[in-house]
Image (cartoon, rainbow, N blue to C red):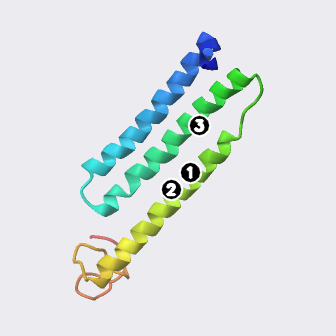
Amino acid sequence: MSHATELPVWAALLVAAFLILGAGLTLLGSFGLVRLRSFYDRIHAPTLGVSWGTAGIVIASMILFTMVQSRPVVHEILIGIFVTVTTPVTLMLLGRAALYRDRAERNPDVPPTNPSIGAHGSPEPRGGAQ
């Protein structure tokens, strides 16, 4: 038996709006995985999609269960905090591991370790192109 049928119309619309927003942002992050070409480009899309998508879904869950249980339900905030903190950190560590591997394999598409040294080994001018 579902108590969600007892929701007022305004609460159901608000929950639906946040669910659609969260799911849409997560879907947008998924498209970034498919659309972007390199691993380094693909790191950014899921981070933003998961973080903002989780926020929308968590807000929808908080509204739904607050209305159904007739008391404030905010423990979902912990889920949002954990997902929002762990996803970017995990992807940053994956990016660093991939960068280390690519530099060890001497992949020519990877930026140099010291960005102030140009392609020919000489320091680049600091004033920019003149």
Residue visible at 69% across and 22% down in the picture: 68
Quadrant assignment, res 73: top right
The front one of 122 and 4 is 4
Position of residue 108 relative to residue 1, above or below, is below
Spatial separation of the CA atoms under disc 3 and disc 2:
16 Å
Disc 3 marks which residue? 58
Q: Residue 128: where, in percent of width, then height?
A: 32, 71
Q: Residue 20: where, in percent of width, then height?
A: 46, 28
The front one of 71 and 98 is 71
Quadrant assignment, res 70: top right
Q: Secondary structure at mark 1?
A: helix
The disc, 1 or 3, on the residue closer to the chain's N-terminal end is 3
Disc 2 marks which residue? 87
Image side of residue 123 versus residue 71, left or right: left
One can see residue 126 in this view: no
Position of residue 61 relative to residue 10, above or below, is below
Residue 84's tag is 1
Mark 3 surroundings: few (<14), some (14-19) or many (≥20) residues within 10 A = many
Mark 2 surroundings: few (<14), some (14-19) or many (≥20) residues within 10 A = some
Q: Residue 60: where, in percent of width, then height?
A: 58, 29
Mark 1 surroundings: few (<14), some (14-19) or many (≥20) residues within 10 A = some
